[in-house]
Structure formats: C-alpha cells, structure tokens
Image (spheres, rainbow, N blue to C red):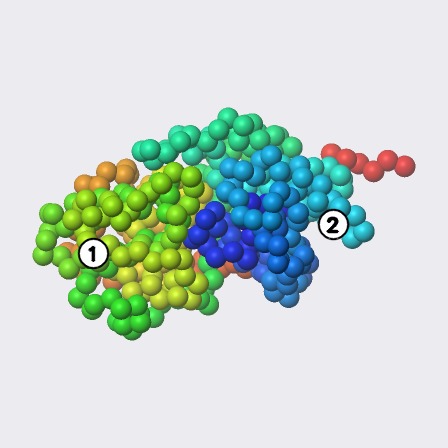
Amino acid sequence: MISLHTSPLEQPGAGDAGGMNVYISHLARALAADGLGIDIYTRATDPLQPDTVLLSPGVRVHHIEAGPRRRLVKEQMPPIADEFAEGLLRRMQDAPRPRVVHSHYWVSGLAGLRAAAEWEIPLVHTMHTMARVKNRHLAAGDLPEPTWRERGEQLIADGATWLTANTAAERDELVRHYDVDEDRIDIVNPGVDLDVFRPAFRSRSRVASGVPAATFHILFAGRLQRLKGPQVLVAAAGELRRRRPDIPLAVTIIGAPSGSLGLDLDALAHEEGLDGVVHRLPPVPAGVLAEWFRSADVVAMPSYSESFGLVALEAQACGTPVVAARVGGLPKAVCDGRTGFLVGGHHPVEWASVLEQLYDDPSTRVDLGRAASIYAQRFGWEQTAEGTRAAYRRAVRAHATAHPVTT
C-alpha cells in the first residue's frame, strides 16, 4: 500500500490525518489477519523515524525519503511524488516483487502508477476524495482544488487497473467526473472497530468525560477545516441558544486545525454568545473518542463533502444518533430517520431546528441510538477486507488479460 501524504501511524484529527489513516491502518490489519502480508509505504517526516515499523503482525510501515524530513501539508506533496516513487523503487530493488500496488489518495496514486509500471503488476487505487467533487461543494471561504490535481486524478483514473469506491455514490462520481468504466470499480464500504466503538451506559461516559447529566451535549470530531463544517455547527448552536435559552447546551469540538486557511472557532463561538458553551479539545485516541461519543446526545457532521464519513459510523456504533449533511457517502453511513437525520443544506437555522427537535424528543434519541448501534454492526473491517481482497483478485485477472505473457 502507498500512503504518501499521511501515515497510518499518525493521530487522526490532526493536520492532514483523518479517516483515511484509520481506513488504511484497519484495512491492513484485517487483510493481514486473512493471511496477506501488507507493506505500507509513507513519507519519512522525522529524522528519528526508523526505516520500518511493525504496525501489527503481518503489517509493516516503511518510511521513504522524499523531500525534507519534516511535516509538509498535502498541497506540497505533488512535486515530490516522483522522488517518493524513486525512493520506493530503490527500497524494493532487492525485495520480492508484490502482486498488487494499492494507492490511497491522488498523490499516492501518482507514485503508484510509476511503481506498478516498473514492476509490471496491477495498480488498485482508492481516491478517498476527488477534486472535481470537492469543487462542486465548497464551503464559504474555501479555495477550489487546483486544476493540476484534477489532471493528476484523471491520469490515475485512466491508468489504474482497478478502483475501489466507498459507496455507490462515489462510484457514480468516478464514472461521471472521470469517465471511469463502471466495470473497473468495486464498491467496498469502510468499516468500524466494533471492539472499541460499542454501546455502553451514557451516564458513565458523561461522568468520565465531565459532562453534566442534564446537559444537551452535541459533539463534533474531525479536522478543523471549513470542508468539515465545524463553523456550521457553532453557528447553529448560536441560533439554538438564541431560540431556546432554556436548553442546557454544551458543544464539544474534538480535533486540530488542518489546511492553509484559518478557521477561528473560538472567535466565532464568542460572536455567537457561546462562551462557556463551546469546548474545544485536541485529537484523542480511539478509546477516549468512543467515550466522548457515548457521552453525547447527538454527533454532528455538517461536512460539505465526504467520501463516506467514518465518524458517523463510529458514533453510531457507540449508540449515539448522528445529524449529518446529505452529501457524498453520508446517506450511506446514516439512515435518515432511523439512525439519525440528514440535513439538505448548511444553513444554521435549519441545523438548529433539527437539533431542537432532538432535544425536545429524548425518546426518539434513544430509539435512534439503538437502531444506530445495530446498523453499525454491518460494517466490521473484516467485510472491508473481504471486498478489498476480491478487488485485488479482479485487478490481477484484468492485468493478466491486458498483458499476456508471450513465449
């Protein structure tokens, strides 16, 4: 596997680390548990990093020299994709040739094209996000993705042997925006760690998290960037507070700033009159995050674009309903009216109305949470690994058909 711009060893929710890190880490572990040997190649970002780290039995993470040994934002990655590919090929020159290259995100795909061609093996690619999709759903104040990213993604869409999409909606976007043959795409839903994210007593989680019992607790978890919409939640909470000052409201935002555009949530909370209501926390480990999910009455995902939305699945696995934007893969992750609610836009008034409705109907919150925990059981990482392995087999067959061995 190739994950150039972010490592599965990094803490999700900080910098450019997010759901993709969780995806790669857990997918690799599940594939290894199924008998595959998985090597993950990422960029070296620290002078003290070892060349190779054992992530779990059968899964190794290799650090490749490309650019300076320090953190770079993902916008700085395209110029060093070739250097990364060269380093990867050098590292592998005396190693057994892999059967498949699986690249994640477009800059990894550029390196994957080079490696797969050199080794004469198939490339499977997972986009995770796409420029042409993001540019159609920009948050206010966001800059569009550059045309050179669109061109790079088109090269990958044309050159990859096989692609996997998180949902049918993402498959359709690949077909519509990148002219990919539908027969070259497998739908493989992401999973959730059901051993960590599981229901438990909300009252105990509230004590552990320091949330008062009577509080209507709304939670956001993710990278703090406009695309993820935390500013929408803060504005909606302000509207709800003005409309219903009787509601004992608390909003917890877990994550760290990401991207080059500033997003001052503290200033926005102050403008909305939410001092003492909005609480910000840095990213936390999965077990602690699960405790926070269980402490919440509702988890909010006002994203402008999501290929799937792992946070929604993790929250629901903990028995907490989710209110999410009706974008990307979120209609697959959240069953509207059964495990939570989908909101058709990003207007704070509309979001405040949905949150108010949930506050006023605690029995519905309980019913949604129960259904959410049951629904999440469909999405174990074992199913994701099974679908991915099937995609690998189809890619190997397609590559063999396109490149017959001549004698």
Location of residue 129 in the rendering, given as x and y in whole percent from the top left corner:
48, 40
* In the rendered image, the vertical position of residue 105 relative to residue 356, given as above or below: above
Q: CA distance from mark 2 to mark 1?
A: 51 Å
Location of residue 283 in the rendering, given as x and y in whole percent from the top left corner:
40, 57
Q: Amino acid at mark 1?
A: Val
Q: In this view of the protein, can residue 95 be seen by the observer? A: yes
> At x 60% / y 45%, what residue is drawn?
68
Q: Residues within 10 Å of mark 2 (few under 14, many from 20)?
A: some
Residue behind mark 2: 91
Location of residue 330 in the rendering, given as x and y in whole percent from the top left corner:
38, 45
> At x 39% / y 51%, what residue is drawn?
256
> At x 56% / y 39%, what residue is drawn?
77
Nearer the observer, 126 or 9: 9
Residue behind mark 1: 277
Q: How many marks?
A: 2
- Upstream in sequence: badge 2 or badge 1: 2
Q: Residue 42 has which mark?
A: none
Q: In this view of the protein, can residue 171 be seen by the observer? A: no
